[in-house]
Image: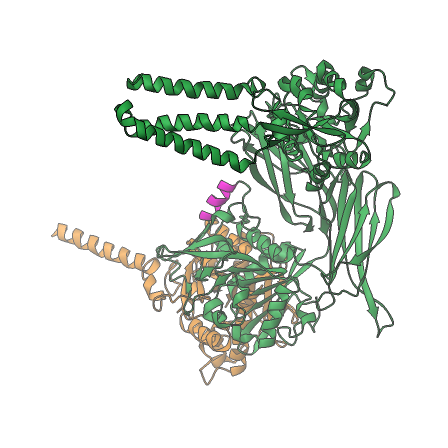
């Protein structure tokens, strides 16, 4: 009987371990929405480790971790807009690039959210550093307030220790490469529908920021104190104001076009 | 031995004419010979049965042949054969002795200089032999001919002492022509030329030989110097583009050969020895490479790549390091001049869709300030985004529709754009851009490019370096970047191994390996079949293992065209280690090829930028109007600045039958570098004053005495050719005792025609005896004697 208990406890332990492992590393196939179609542009979301886990990011690299927030609907809606409104060849379904893999270099444009949660090993930081300096483009979104910014920058300083972050002016080329975006405002998450607030935490002011390379090319486009992903995702919601979604779509299409021309 | 059998010198037979002195006509001789042969045949046939049955068959024919030949020779002798030959009248003709006194004759071989050997040969009997029958005159020849003795000179030895091998150059052709002209009134019976055959102009002109043939003057040549050096390395030639864009990477193609160093290592260097460098002797090292020397005497070619640096006139010194025991080190160095322009070149790049190739090509050119890309890309169905424009109006109306707008660029790059995007007028402009304007056109692969973009049915098919496939669907993207079995890779074609466009690493073998190690391409396109005359520099290897041309180039009209059949080379940047320059270097070199040779409205040139010993050069200018049509009504001037304050303004005159071409001949008076600015202008009725069409700058350099250091081995071929063509003979030192005997038989000068009978030649009697002996021996062998 004692042996039976021991065996049962061991089986339960194994099952829990397997489940945790699956949550962390398994289930990759669930990120993919069909076989890749040969494309010029792959909408690619960055998969990273979450070091500042909160209620939305159980585990460390699991599906539904911080990196996958609003995935896939936000990304999919954006991809549809990209196909409809630009000349960019992008028939392939959504794509995920892992910070741990050199396949990151196959996709010169990546989108990352909740970057206040990201952490890098030295190897990953080096990979992202090389990715950006070789010509890659990173768009970060959905983090709010002072603490989030500090956490984001902690990761960013591992990647680009000496590169300054600057506020983008309205006349910057990135806002005129496809659409002339002369007026920008804070783009809230779907929380706005219930609260009417456009900010979260202490992120009262939208930050349109960037990090450039030595030639002035924007490598990292930063959308702080905003949540463009929600604006794409909730674009078909009657309660979510169109003006936020409209601006969010124009912004991301400009960023992608900029990334492919600069 | 010859005279033992033939009684007379070889010259008698070479110069003379055969004649039959007998009174009877020659046809009668032929008749007699035939009759004798027939009679002998009849006699043998009629008597063979009873006298010698054993001679039946072929043996009778042999006997008949021997007897007939004997009869024929006897009959010919009866007709009195002879040679009639012109012979110089004793003491009435002049034999000119020409001694090469150029510096190469000062090379010491076998214990004495070539000059000393020549003088010794003259003193050891040649001159004395000639003086027995002729007057002699001694000349020195180098870049001209000059007499060294005088009519009343009593001591030839003193005259010969004045010959010193110090002249800086040898122009045997010019010297001989000058000699011929100056002695036109003299009874020159023959010329004896003592030389190593060094000819700095490269060869002997036909006009020189004609001048001597017209006067029937034989030129006897005596060669000095070894025909092959024992230990030497010589640079034969260096090819460097005469003009380049500042900061360009250019190639020096070095051709050289060696004697006696097969398998040895040789260090080749290129240095900038322009005056702006403080250490002028050494100069700034631009490139260097150690190569292994190949087969003895065979020409070997190596290419060194280097960055030419800032704008200005550059003097490059190309050198082969001295090897142990090398006899002549003066032929290890060559000099070239390159005019490096400061004007940036502009490429118009039109792209049909935002894509990574566009971005990374632009990124590669960020560091190249001399090549600027002005681009337009269709971002959406109805939007075009412009980059690199000079002002808001540039390309505001889309792709240029006027020649002056399109021709403002030096290069044109067309990406993933359908042929139908361009109007018929624009397509014609593209053709004229290459053909008339001389611009470079590069087409890239893409989903709307080449055959898939309808370019195979456009009016520009003849412009392309390949015959595009007739069907579409030639563009293929990488199926799945994560799948290692679907990749397309690139490798160099043989022509690309040492090509300036595809050179990523200096060493050719390492370069080929580097290409094979490049990351796979994100896509490829089948460009069809390269046209004759096109060059395939690189191939792509498809996932199925098929080899397709990747990079094809071709010259077209005044310009050049190329196809880079992919839009996915950007992976070379993203998937190579950070700091790897392969992608950027390739595109910088490719785009420089697109624009570097695009001419302006005025293109000036000289036949050779290095003027060796002779300062005369011809300046040619090709002048075009704003639409790049020839401008024959232009006024073209060359302003030349040279060393020691040399300054000249030369007007160039139109070249007949070549509209827009202008030429002027000018002589660079002194050694040094010359900077020439050629300007063209023409009357403008509207402005009421001359309108400048354009200007160009070229450089050339005069050097004296350099050519004499090269080709120092005896040029026997030239000496033999000269002698053969003029009726003389090439002599070597051991044969010189017979020279005097050969000289008299000449048709030049004051001659008498003499007859030399041949009936009493020892050879004739020997043949007659042999014929009789042969018949006797055969009869004895066959048992009928």
Image coordinates of residue B487 in percent, x first then y, are: 39, 56
Answer yes or no: is residue A109 visible: no
In the picture, which quadrant includes the C terminus of chain A?
A: bottom right
Q: Is residue B629 left or right of residue B763?
A: right
Answer yes or no: is residue B86 visible: yes
Q: Residue drawn at (62%, 57%), measured in percent from left and top?
A: B366
Q: Is residue A161 left or right of residue A2?
A: right
Q: Residue drawn at (66%, 75%), measured in percent from left and top?
A: B396
Image coordinates of residue B565 in percent, x first then y, are: 48, 60
Q: Nearer the viewer, residue B158 or A117?
A: B158
Q: Colour of chain A?
A: orange
Q: Quadrant of residue A90?
A: bottom left
Q: How many numbered marks, from 0 up?
A: 0
Q: Colour of chain B?
A: green
Q: Nearer the viewer, residue B420 or A210?
A: B420
Q: Quadrant of residue B2?
A: top right
In the rendered image, the residue lying farthest to the left is: A1
Please tell me whether residue B177 belongs to the stretch shown in magenta. Answer: no
Above/below status of B453 relative to B777: below
Find the magenta span and give its range: B508-517
Q: Nearer the viewer, residue B763 or B627?
A: B763
Query: Which is the main secondary structure of the residues drawn in magenta?
Result: helix
Image coordinates of residue A104 in percent, x first then y, are: 45, 57
Above/below status of B585 relative to A202: above
Image coordinates of residue B1 in percent, x first then y, are: 56, 17
Q: Is residue B507 left or right of residue B101?
A: left
Please tell me whether residue B512 belongs to the stretch shown in magenta. Answer: yes
């Amino acid at each position: 009987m004692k042996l039976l208990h021991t065996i049962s406890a061991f089986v339960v332990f194994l099952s829990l371990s397997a489940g945790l492992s699956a949550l962390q590393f398994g289930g990759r196939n669930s990120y993919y929405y069909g076989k890749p179609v040969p494309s010029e542009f792959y909408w690619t979301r960055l998969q990273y480790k979450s070091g500042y886990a909160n209620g939305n990011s159980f585990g460390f690299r699991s599906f539904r971790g911080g990196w996958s927030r609003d995935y896939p609907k936000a990304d999919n809606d954006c991809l549809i807009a990209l196909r409809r409104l630009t000349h960019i060849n992008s028939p392939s379904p959504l794509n995920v690039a892992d910070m741990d893999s050199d396949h990151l270099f196959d996709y010169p444009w990546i989108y990352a959210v909740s970057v206040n949660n990201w952490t890098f090993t030295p190897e990953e930081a080096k990979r992202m550093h090389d990715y950006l300096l070789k010509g890659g483009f990173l768009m970060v979104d959905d983090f709010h307030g002072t603490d989030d910014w500090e956490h984001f920058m902690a990761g960013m300083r591992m990647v680009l220790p000496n590169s300054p972050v600057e506020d983008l002016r309205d006349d910057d080329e990135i806002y005129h490469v496809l659409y002339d975006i002369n007026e920008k405002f804070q783009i809230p998450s779907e929380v706005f529908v219930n609260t009417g607030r456009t900010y979260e935490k202490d992120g009262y002011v939208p930050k349109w920021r960037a990090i450039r390379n030595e030639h002035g090319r924007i490598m990292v486009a930063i959308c702080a104190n905003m949540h463009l992903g929600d604006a794409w995702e909730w674009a078909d919601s009657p309660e979510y104001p169109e003006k936020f979604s409209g601006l969010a779509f124009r912004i991301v299409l400009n960023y992608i076009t900029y990334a492919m021309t600069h | 031995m010859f005279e033992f059998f033939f009684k007379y010198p070889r010259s008698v037979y070479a110069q003379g004419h055969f004649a039959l002195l007998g009174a009877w006509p020659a046809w009668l001789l032929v008749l007699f010979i035939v009759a004798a042969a027939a009679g002998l045949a009849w006699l043998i046939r009629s008597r063979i049965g009873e006298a010698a049955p054993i001679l039946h068959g072929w043996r009778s024919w042999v006997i008949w042949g021997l007897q007939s030949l004997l009869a024929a020779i006897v009959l010919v002798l009866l007709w009195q054969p002879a040679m009639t030959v012109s012979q110089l009248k004793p003491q009435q003709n002049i034999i000119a002795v020409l001694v090469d006194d150029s510096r190469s004759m000062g090379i010491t071989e076998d214990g004495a200089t070539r000059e000393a050997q020549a003088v010794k040969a003259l003193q050891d009997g040649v001159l004395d032999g000639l003086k027995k029958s002729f007057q002699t005159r001694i000349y020195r020849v180098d870049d001209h001919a000059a007499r060294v003795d005088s009519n009343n000179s009593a001591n030839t030895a003193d005259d010969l002492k004045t010959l010193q091998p110090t002249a800086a150059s040898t122009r045997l052709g010019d010297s001989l022509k000058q000699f011929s002209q100056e002695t036109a009134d003299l009874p020159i019976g023959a010329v004896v030329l003592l030389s190593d055959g060094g000819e700095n102009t490269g060869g002997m002109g036909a006009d020189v030989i004609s001048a001597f043939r017209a006067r029937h003057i034989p030129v006897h040549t005596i060669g000095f110097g070894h025909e092959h050096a024992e230990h030497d390395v010589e640079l034969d030639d260096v090819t460097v583009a005469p003009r380049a864009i500042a900061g360009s990477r250019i190639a020096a193609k070095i051709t050289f050969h060696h004697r006696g160093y097969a398998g040895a290592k040789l260090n080749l260097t290129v240095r900038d020895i322009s005056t702006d460098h403080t250490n002028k002797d050494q100069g700034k090292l631009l490139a260097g490479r150690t190569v292994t020397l190949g087969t003895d005497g065979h020409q070997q070619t190596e290419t060194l790549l280097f960055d030419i640096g800032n704008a200005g006139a550059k003097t490059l010194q190309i050198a082969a390091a001295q090897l142990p025991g090398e006899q002549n080190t003066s032929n290890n160095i060559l000099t070239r001049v390159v005019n490096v322009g400061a004007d940036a070149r502009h490429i118009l790049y039109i792209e049909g869709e935002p894509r990574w190739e566009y971005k990374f090509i632009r990124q590669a050119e960020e560091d190249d300030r001399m090549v600027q890309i002005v681009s337009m890309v269709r971002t959406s169905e109805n939007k075009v985004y412009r980059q690199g424009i000079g002002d808001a109006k540039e390309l505001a109306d889309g792709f240029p529709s006027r020649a002056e707008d399109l021709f403002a660029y030096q290069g044109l790059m067309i990406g993933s754009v359908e042929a139908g995007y361009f109007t018929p007028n624009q397509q014609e402009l593209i053709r004229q851009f290459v053909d008339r304007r001389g611009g470079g056109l590069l087409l890239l692969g893409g989903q709307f490019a080449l055959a898939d973009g309808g370019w195979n049915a456009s009016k520009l098919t003849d412009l392309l370096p390949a015959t595009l496939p007739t069907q579409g669907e030639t563009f293929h993207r990488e199926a799945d970047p994560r799948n290692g079995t679907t990749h397309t890779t690139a490798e160099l074609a043989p022509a690309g191994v040492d090509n300036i466009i595809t050179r990523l690493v200096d060493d050719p073998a390492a370069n080929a390996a580097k290409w094979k190690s490049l990351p796979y391409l994100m896509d490829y396109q089948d460009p069809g079949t390269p046209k004759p005359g096109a060059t395939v520099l690189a191939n792509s290897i498809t996932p199925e293992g098929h080899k397709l041309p990747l990079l094809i180039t071709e010259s077209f009209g005044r310009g050049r065209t190329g196809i880079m059949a992919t839009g996915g080379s950007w992976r070379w940047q993203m998937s190579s280690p950070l700091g790897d320059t392969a992608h950027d270097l390739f595109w910088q070199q490719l785009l420089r090829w697109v624009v570097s040779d695009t001419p302006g409205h005025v293109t000036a040139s000289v036949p050779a930028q290095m003027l060796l010993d002779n300062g005369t050069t011809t300046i040619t200018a090709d002048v075009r109007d704003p639409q790049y049509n020839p401008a024959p009504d232009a006024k073209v001037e060359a302003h030349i600045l040279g060393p020691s304050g040399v300054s000249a303004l030369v007007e160039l005159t139109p070249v007949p039958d070549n509209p827009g071409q202008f030429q002027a001949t000018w002589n660079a008076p002194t050694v040094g570098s010359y900077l020439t600015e050629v300007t063209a202008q023409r009357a403008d009725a509207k402005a009421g004053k001359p309108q400048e069409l354009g200007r160009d700058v070229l450089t050339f350099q005069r050097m004296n005495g350099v050519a004499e250091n090269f080709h120092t081995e005896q040029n026997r071929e030239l000496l033999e050719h000269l002698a053969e063509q003029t009726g003389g003979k090439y002599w070597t030192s051991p044969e010189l005792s017979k020279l005097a005997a050969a000289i008299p038989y000449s048709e030049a000068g004051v001659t008498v025609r003499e007859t030399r009978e041949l009936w009493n030649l020892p050879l004739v009697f020997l043949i007659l005896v042999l014929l009789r002996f042969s018949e006797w021996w055969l009869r004895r062998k066959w048992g009928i004697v």
